[in-house]
Every structure is written in C-alpha cells, then in structure tokens.
Image: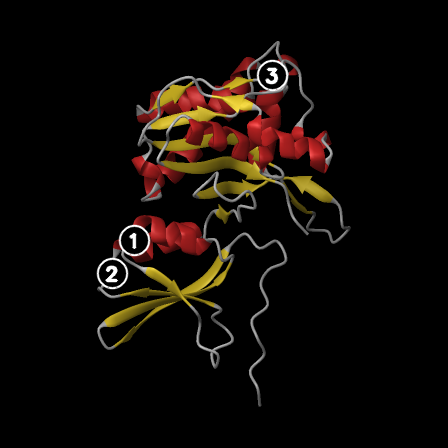
Amino acid sequence: MTEERYQPDSRANHLEAWKLTRSGSAWFLQYRGVPAVTDHVLGILPRAKAVGTLSHDPQWPYRIRMDFKPDGSLAEFLDFLQEVLVIHIRQKGCLDAAIALDFYTRPAKNGSGDLVYTSTAQSIRLIKHYESAEQAEVDRAGQELCRSLSDAIVRHEWFNEATRILAVPGHARDKPSVSVLLGTLLSRELGIELTSVSCTTPLRKPAKLMSPRERATMLHEFRVDEDLAGETILVLDDVYHTGYTMAGVANAARRAGAGTVLGLAAARNLRR
C-alpha cells in the first residue's frame, strides 16, 4: 500500500515537525511545514546545504544536509521555529528571512466560520487606537509585545546578530506607527540602534487597501539616509499583510548597503 503524501497546513506558516538522521559522515535534517524554514537553518548554519528529499519518504518533503555533527543548539532553534510563524517571502532579493509571532485573527472555536482577534492582535489594536484607551492599558500592551518580540530576537540565532532596527513607518502623518513605537521599546530593551526610515510619498493608503499595482510601488517608497554597509538589519512591522511594506523598507536598507536584512512582525494575516 502506497503511503499517502504529506499535505501541508493550508496556512503554510509553521515548521510542523522535524527529525535528524545520520548517514555515514553526514547528518540530514528532514522536516515538513513551510519550505522557508530552510532559509532560517542555512542562516545559522551556512555550511549546510539544501538537498532534495528521498522519493520513497513522502512524509518529509524538505531535507538539509550537514557534513558535520550539529550541536544541541539546533534542536532548540528548531523547537523555537515551531512556536512562531515562518514567512514565505514573495519579494525575492529584499529580505533574507522573516517571522511573525502570531496570526492576527484565528477561526472562532465555535465552528461558526467567524474570525476572532488573537491576543497579539488585541494588543496591537489597543496601541493603534490609544486615544480611546486607558494609558496604563496601552503601556501594558506595549510592554507585553516588546517582551515577546525581544524573546524572539534573542532565541533566533540569526536575528540576534542584528545591529540596527528599521521600523516600518506609518501612513498617518499625525502620529507614529505601532511599528515605530515598538521599535523604540525594543531598541531600549536590547540596546540595538533604531534607525530612521522616511517615505517618499507624504500621504499613502494602508497597504491592505491598495491594489496589486499600488502595492508593487511600495518596493521603492522608503529611504534610509544612513550608511548601513555590511550591517545586519532587522525590519520591524506590527502586522504583515502582503509583505510589500516590509520588503520596501528592506529594499531601502539594501540600497544603503546592508549585508543581511531580516523581517520580524508581531502578527500576520491569516491565509486560508
């Protein structure tokens, strides 16, 4: 009887399972889930290489070869990737890898088909609409998100090499974006310099309201005036929608000379 081939989660965001096997002098990491996991593993293990999976093992579609014995930190790193959302980057050449802490919405548990905000989204919304909330609640939400983002950076063996934080600017001129507010907190928490990002267009629509053609223009919307030659940059966004805004800031970092550009979002939209 032929074994049924593995079918990934339709949301395609998780490292679902992994195993480490040895063959002669080589070690093989096999996994199932989002293929972008490979980008993260190669980021922390540049000596490793992605190889095709074995045709007779349909349950493990992705495979990475290591001609060395990995230490115990790899298992800890892979366990971490099972806790966050690994983002598949469509705008090639801008970001090297990206993750999000959580989904923005999830299906309601009552089976109604409705979507409900996650606790991460509730914190983001509280900060975004701070005028109608108690300041203590806003501050608490900011600190909670900052702790979660900080923990993700520290535990990600590639992200914790970041030397600069670039927060995605907002589309409203009269108040800072949630990303900038979180970036300020993270900069203080981790001692990583927060670098200013400017927009070429004074007023712009939120990315979620843009047409596909308008979103594509976001790749050239942002500017970084400082020299980032050879630096590892962390682009921070509150919500990851289509990826064009984060990619646009990443592209600006590339033009300023950045060597590695990584993306971190507090939440991402649920993909069905």
> Which residue corresponds to mark 1?
45
Q: Secondary structure at mark 1?
A: loop
> Which residue corresponds to mark 2?
70
Residue at horizontal 50 percent and vertical 41 percent from the top: 100
Q: Nearer the viewer, residue 22 or 252?
A: 252
Query: Comparing marks 1 and 3, which lies closer to the viewer?
Result: 1
Estimate the x, y position of residue 193 in percent, counting from the top left: 34, 21
Residue at horizontal 31 percent and vertical 49 percent from the top: 44
Name the residue type under label 2. Answer: Pro
Residue count near mark 2 (Cα–Cα under 10 Å), binned few <14, some 14–19, many ≥20? some
Label 3 to label 2: alpha-carbon separation:
46 Å
User: As displayed, is residue 140 above or below residue 31?
Assistant: above
Q: Which of the labelled discs sits on residue 130, or is there none?
A: 3
User: As displayed, is residue 53 above or below residue 229?
Assistant: below
Q: Secondary structure at mark 2?
A: loop
Q: Is residue 26 left or right of residue 90?
A: left
Asked whether the beta carbons under mark 2 and mark 1 sit within 8 Å of each other, the answer is yes
Name the residue type under label 1. Answer: Leu
Q: Secondary structure at mark 3?
A: helix
Q: Quadrant of residue 37?
A: bottom left
User: As displayed, is residue 7 above or below residue 175?
Assistant: below
Estimate the x, y position of residue 110 in percent, counting from the top left: 73, 51
Residue 123 appears in the figure: no
Q: Which of the labelled discs sits on residue 178, or is there none?
A: none
Estimate the x, y position of residue 17 in percent, counting from the top left: 45, 63
Label 2 to label 1: alpha-carbon separation:
9 Å
Query: Comparing marks 2 and 1, which lies closer to the viewer?
Result: 1
Estimate the x, y position of residue 4 in percent, counting from the top left: 58, 79
Image quarter of the N terminus: bottom right
Q: Nearer the viewer, residue 198 or 77?
A: 198
Query: Comparing marks 3 and 2, which lies closer to the viewer?
Result: 2
Q: Is residue 193 left or right of residue 167?
A: left
